Structure formats: C-alpha cells, structure tokens
C-alpha cells in the first residue's frame, strides 16, 4: 500500500500542515496577542489621560466628593480596572476614601499597574494609579484563537483530501497504467493499451513512452531478423572454423614433422661437422707435425727438403679448405659470435701485407698500402675476423691478378657514426656484371683454369657474412680487362692506446731444450691415435721431459693414480672413456686439483672448447697445432723455461747453442763421468749413446743437452766440460 505515490506524497502534506499549525501556535499567535495587549494598554493609557484632564480642576479645588463619585463611576464602567487610587503630592490618599484599612495593590499574573502623574502648569498636583486585570481579556482572545486553529485544521484536512483525489486522477492512475505498460514492454509485449490522459506533462510522458515503445517494437522485429541472419552466419562460420582447425592441425603436424626433421638434420649436420673436424684434423695434425719435424733434420738432401715443403704446403692448404668449410657451416648454424676487444689496426694491416708479400713477389706483383690512407690505429673489434676478411680479399686479388699489382686503402667515413673504410683494388681481369650478382654466393668460382680449382669458393661468402655480422656492408666495382675494387664499410669504435699496448715479446728461436735449474716434470699423454701419441712424445722427450702414454681416458685415470704426473695432454674423443669424463674423475681424486690438464682437440666449435674448460681442464690446444703452441701451453701452466736457437738461425745446418756447465756435470757420479769420457774418446757412437742414456736416469735435462751436442759431433765441448768438472775441488 505504501508503495503508492499517493501515500508517499501524503506524509509531506501532513508535515507541511503541521509546520503551518506549529508556526501559528508558537510564533504568530503569541506575537499577535502581544500586539493586542500593547494596543489595549495604550488605549487605557489614552483613556486615563482624558480622565486626568477632568480631575485636575477637581483636585485643585479639593472637591473630594465629586472626585470619588466620578472615579467610582469610572470603575463601574470598566470592570477590568480592578482598583483605582488617587493620591496627593504629599502622599495623602484622595480615592478611595480611607476607611481604616488600606487596599493593597496585589501583584499576580494577569494584573498590570499603571501610574499616571497629575501636574498643572509644571507642578505635580497628584498621582492616579490604576491596576488592570487582563485575565478575562486574555481568555477571550485565547478562545478566539482556538476557534481559528480548529478552522485551519479543517481547511488543511479538506485540502489534503482534495489533493489526494486530484493526484489519483491526474497522476497516480496514469502512472499506474504507464508502469503496467513498462512491465509488459519488459516482457516484449508491445501492444498493451496506454491512453493519453491529457496534454500536460504526464500526458507528454506517456505519449513519449508510447512512441518509444513503438520504435522498440520495430527495432525488436529488425533485431530478431538480424539475429536469425547472424545465427545462420555463425553456423557457417563455425563450420568454416572447424574446417580451418582441421587444416591447421594437419599443417601443424606437418610443420612439427618438418621442424623435427630440420632439428635432426641440424644435429646431424653439427655431428657430421664435429666428426669431420676430428677425422680430418687428427691425421692432418700428424702430417703437418711430422713433416715439420723432418724438415729440421740436418741430414736431409735438398730434394728431400723440397718434397717435405710440398707436403707441408699441401697440408696447410688442406687445413685452409677445412677451416673455410667449417667456418661456413658455423655461420649457417648461427654459432658464430664476434669477440670484441681493443687491438692495433696498423699492426694487423702490416702483418697481413707482410704475410701476402711473398706470394705477390712470386707472381711479380706489387702489393702496396696507399700512403694517403689515414685511419685510426687503435680500435675495438674482432681482430681475428677482420684479419680474415683482409686476407681473403688480398689473397683473391693476388691469386687472380696476372700483372700489375694490388693496392690496399684505409680511411674513415663520418656518418651518424664513424665508419672504417677498407678498399682492395687490383689490376686483374675484372668481373663481368652478370657474375657480380652471384659473386658472394657460397661455392661460386668465376675464374677459369687452375685458379678456379685452388679454392672452395667460400672465401667471399665468408667475408660477406663476417662483414654483415659486424654491422657493415661490402660492395664491388669492376671493369672487365682493367681490374676490380672491393669496398667495405664497418662501424668502428676507437680504443685508447693504454688498452692496446702490451709488453713486446722478444722474438725467440726454436725450442731446443729445457733451461737448467728446473723441477723434474712428468708428462702424461692421453691420445688414442698412435701417430699423435708419437708426435707429442717426440716433442716432450726431445726437450728432456719424462712421458707416459695412455690410449684412453680410463687408462689415464689409472696411470694418474699410480704415477702422479705434473701435466696431462688430454684428447677429447677416445674409446672406452673420453677426455671430459676422465678429467672430471681425476679432479675428484686426491691431488686431482693440483695436476694441470690441457685438451688437445680437433673441435671446430667454440662452445665445445668451453665445455672442456667447464669440465675442469686448464687450457686447450687445437689440432693441428704448431710446436710453439705446445711449448707455450706448457710454459703457461707449469712455468717451464726453455733454451732456444738464436732467431733466424737454421738449425738444420748449425748445431744448437747448448751451454754445458761444470755445475750441471757435477751432479753425476764420478764413475759415470769417467764412462762418458771414455766413450767420447773411443768415438764409438753406440757407447756414447749408452752413456748418455745412463745420464738420463740422473738428470734428463742434462741428458738432452748432451744428446744435442753429440748429434752434431761436438765432442770437444763435452770433454772440455768433463775435464773442468774433474779438476774442480
């Protein structure tokens, strides 16, 4: 019931009525009564003024009887005047006459006393005092007000009733119809009757609602039709979606298969490259190593030396081809990374020119660095890759140029950042425009004849890959019959001189032995290939180091526990147990952390080299190695010091400069020194060798020095040292 608008408005009407009644009762009526009272008192005051004017002659004449008669009549005419008193100036009461007991002026609510002085010509002649009783007057006024309140209450009640009736017809009933129509609209009923009650605001509201309902009905029909169309489209889309999912699932399966096949192919390729690197580098290590060792034999004939030079050059060429193929494979596999470090660009360019100068002279070509070249000497970059780029370009230019020369230019170009410019220009046959488009593709050889068969066709492709990896560009300009110019632009960062300068190492000759005064080192060689075992053993024993050989990792661990070597050469790939597992086991054994272990690996990939270091190895040397790399590794890890031939001395024709001192010979027993002296005097080579082998049991370094002198028949030097040792007290 109380949800009706009528009942919601009625309390507000009642509150407004109560507010009006409260205002009348507590504000307006008290004020009105006070105003009436004031007017009544003023009226009595004026009346008294008239009475006083009539009393003045009587008071002056002292006509007390007449005064009493007049004031008595006045009191009778005004019943509200409770008492009247007239006194003379000296306080004598003239009215009412004194009867023995004076009438006291009382003071209670509803009584009002008025004192009016009587004066004549400025002189007081008396005082008239009147006490009014206002209680009857107030009761009369209150009765009138109560009647007014009752009348107002009736009017308000009638107004509320009329308001309710009016609201019912004008607002409530139309709004009820509107509410029912809205509920029907919520149920999607658009045809419920809704008459317009009039032209007022309520009528406008209902009319607007009816128009809106009509529009919603039309829109609803259109929407239903659209929904039907969309439902049909969704069904078709769902069918198409299912078809696409089936196709995607099929293609995903195909792609996964292709991906797995690609990964398997990539793994197989990496495995093949690793195997190929090992299988090619391992025998090549023996070929280059033994050919180099044989070239040092002083007894070689010139023809034999030429044959060995051919073997060595062919091996070096084969190594270059292998490196090119492996480098290209690493590029394609994304396994090539730059190693940025400060370096001396000027020294690097000079080294490349010196390296290629011999080949240029053999062909009668000039190889020049343009003297106008201005470039920063110290930069940050990958020195090895940049060196390879320059070697490839200069090498190609020298190889394909028949006459004239090759010029190298360097400069700097300042764009948004500094770029290094490298130009290699030749006077060769030039390159046709159609061939320039495929010049940098792998395995492309444009030259004809023997020159085309002397390489893999990978040099320029690798060069472009290196340049792009460094963020640069490479281009070619060529005119057939006049020559070609290769231009490279590389972003470059300058380096400080202090970052590049290193202590200059004095050039040293060939290692011929151990310097005296060093510990006796034991070297364990772990290698499954007999040729490489023999090569490493020769390199160790030639300078006086004691060695043992293990053909696999398991045997290496066993010998380590029994023999306790100071240094282990560890091959990576071996049967039974590989070098990585052997290293891990040795590191866990007592004393395993003290021994130095260096890998001798034919691995082509840098991450495999890092794997060796992570397994606990201290260093690594890559096959095929140069002898100085082996000796340098020993020096780094053990601090070994060597005896060298003088730089530039050809040891094949001159004996090694070995210093034999009495201090070294003094460690030998006197009997052994005497046996060695007798063998030397007998000139019997077998006796001399046998005596030197006995010396090896005491001091292997001394034994090696004696063998070096005996090999070149420098017997007098040994005899002189023996005599000096025997004469020393």
Image (cartoon, grey):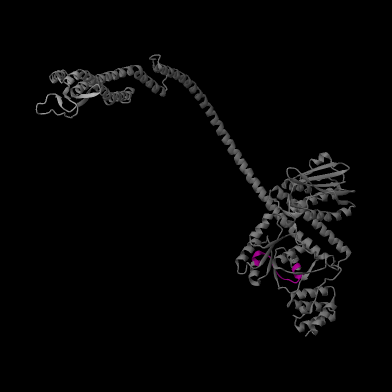
Residue 631 screen position, x and y as percent: 75, 65
Q: Is residue 41 magenta?
A: no
Residue occupying image coordinates x 84% and y 44%? 484
Image-based side of 113 in relation to 360, left or right? left
Task: Kindly indicate the quadrant of the structure image that contains residue 318.
Answer: bottom right
Residue occupying image coordinates x 64% and y 46%? 261
Instruction: Indicate the quadrant containing the N terminus: top left, top right, bottom left or bottom right.
Output: top left
Q: Is residue 552 magenta?
A: yes
Residue 170 visible in the snapshot = yes
Residue occupying image coordinates x 84% and y 59%? 310
Q: Observer-nearest residue: 594 or 133?
A: 133
Residue 641 screen position, x and y as percent: 74, 69
Q: Observer-nearest residue: 605 or 582?
A: 605
- Label count reads 0
Image-based side of 303 in relation to 555, left or right? right
| Position above or below: 344 against 255 | below
Task: Kindly indicate the quadrant of the structure image that contains residue 724.
Answer: bottom right
Task: Kindly indicate the quadrant of the structure image that contains residue 188.
Answer: top left
Residue 691 screen position, x and y as percent: 78, 79
Residue 450 visible in the snapshot = no
Residue 276 screen position, x and y as percent: 72, 54
Image-based side of 527 in relation to 373, left or right? left
| Position above or below: 213 against 724 | above
Which segment is the magenta one?
539-556
Instruction: Indicate the quadrant containing the C terminus: top left, top right, bottom left or bottom right.
Output: bottom right
């Amino acid at each position: 019931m109380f949800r009706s608008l009528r009942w919601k408005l009625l309390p507000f009407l009642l509150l407004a009525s109560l507010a009006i009644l409260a205002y009348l009762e507590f504000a307006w009526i008290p004020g009105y009564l006070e105003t009436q009272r004031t007017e009544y008192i003023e009226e009595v005051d004026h009346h008294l003024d008239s009475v006083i004017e009539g009393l003045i002659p009587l008071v002056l004449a002292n006509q007390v009887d007449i005064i009493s008669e007049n004031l008595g009549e006045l009191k009778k005419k005004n019943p509200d005047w409770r008492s009247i008193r007239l006194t003379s100036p000296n306080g004598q009461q003239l009215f009412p006459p004194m009867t023995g007991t004076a009438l006291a002026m009382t003071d209670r609510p509803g009584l009002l006393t008025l004192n009016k002085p009587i004066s004549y010509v400025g002189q007081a002649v008396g005082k008239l005092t009147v006490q009014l009783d206002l209680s009857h007057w107030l009761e009369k006024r209150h009765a009138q007000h109560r009647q007014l309140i009752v009348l107002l209450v009736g009017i308000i009640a009638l107004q509320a009733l009329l308001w309710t009736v009016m609201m019912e017809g004008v607002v409530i009933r139309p709004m009820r119809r509107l509410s029912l129509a809205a509920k029907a609209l919520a149920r999607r009923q658009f045809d419920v009757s809704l008459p317009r009650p009039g032209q007022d605001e309520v009528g406008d509201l209902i009319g607007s609602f009816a128009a809106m309902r009509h529009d919603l009905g039309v829109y609803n029909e259109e929407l239903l039709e659209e929904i039907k169309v969309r439902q049909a489209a969704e069904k078709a889309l769902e069918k198409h979606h299912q078809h696409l999912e089936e196709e995607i699932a099929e293609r995903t399966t195909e792609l996964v298969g292709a991906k797995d096949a690609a990964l398997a192919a990539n793994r197989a390729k990496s495995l093949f490259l690793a195997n190929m690197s090992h299988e090619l580098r391992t025998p090549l290590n023996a070929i280059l190593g033994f050919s180099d060792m044989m070239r040092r034999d002083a007894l070689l004939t010139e023809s034999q030396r030429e044959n060995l030079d051919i073997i060595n050059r062919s091996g070096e060429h084969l190594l270059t081809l292998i490196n090119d193929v492996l480098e290209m494979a690493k590029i394609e596999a994304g396994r090539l990374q730059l190693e940025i470090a400060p370096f001396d660009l000027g020294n690097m360019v000079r080294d490349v020119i010196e390296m290629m100068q011999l080949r240029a002279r053999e062909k009668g070509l000039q190889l020049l660095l343009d003297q106008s070249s201005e470039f920063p000497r110290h930069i940050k970059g990958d020195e090895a890759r940049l060196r390879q780029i320059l070697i490839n370009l200069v090498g190609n230019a020298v190889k394909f140029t028949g006459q004239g020369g090759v010029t190298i230019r360097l400069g700097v170009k300042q764009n948004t950042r500094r770029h290094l410019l490298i130009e290699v220009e030749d006077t060769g046959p030039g390159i046709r425009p159609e061939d320039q488009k495929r010049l940098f593709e792998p395995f492309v050889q444009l030259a004809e004849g023997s020159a085309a068969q002397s390489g893999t066709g990978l040099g320029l492709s690798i060069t472009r890959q290196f340049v792009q990896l460094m963020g640069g560009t490479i281009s070619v300009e060529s005119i057939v019959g006049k020559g070609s110019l290769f231009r490279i632009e590389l972003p470059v960062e300058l380096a400080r001189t202090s970052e590049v300068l290193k202590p200059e190492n004095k050039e040293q000759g060939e290692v011929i032995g151990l310097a005296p005064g060093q510990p006796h080192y034991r070297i364990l060689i772990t290698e499954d290939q007999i040729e490489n075992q023999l090569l490493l053993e020769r390199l160790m024993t030639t300078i006086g180091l004691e060695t043992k050989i293990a053909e696999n990792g398991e045997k290496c661990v066993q010998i380590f526990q029994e023999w306790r070597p100071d240094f282990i050469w560890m091959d990576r790939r071996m049967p039974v147990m590989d070098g990585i597992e052997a290293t891990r086991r040795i590191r866990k054994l007592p004393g395993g952390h003290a021994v130095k272990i260096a890998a001798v690996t034919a691995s082509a990939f840098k991450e495999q080299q890092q794997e060796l270091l992570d397994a606990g190895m201290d260093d690594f040397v890559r096959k095929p190695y140069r002898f100085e790399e082996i000796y340098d590794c020993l020096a780094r890890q053990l601090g070994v010091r060597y005896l060298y031939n003088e730089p530039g001395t050809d040891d094949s024709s001159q004996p090694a400069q070995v210093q034999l001192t009495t201090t070294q010979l003094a460690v030998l027993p006197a009997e052994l020194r005497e046996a060695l002296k007798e063998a030397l005097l007998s000139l019997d080579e077998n006796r001399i060798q046998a005596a030197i082998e006995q010396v090896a049991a005491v001091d292997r370094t001394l034994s090696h020095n004696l063998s070096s002198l005996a090999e070149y028949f420098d017997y007098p030097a040994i005899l002189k040292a023996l005599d000096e040792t025997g004469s020393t007290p």
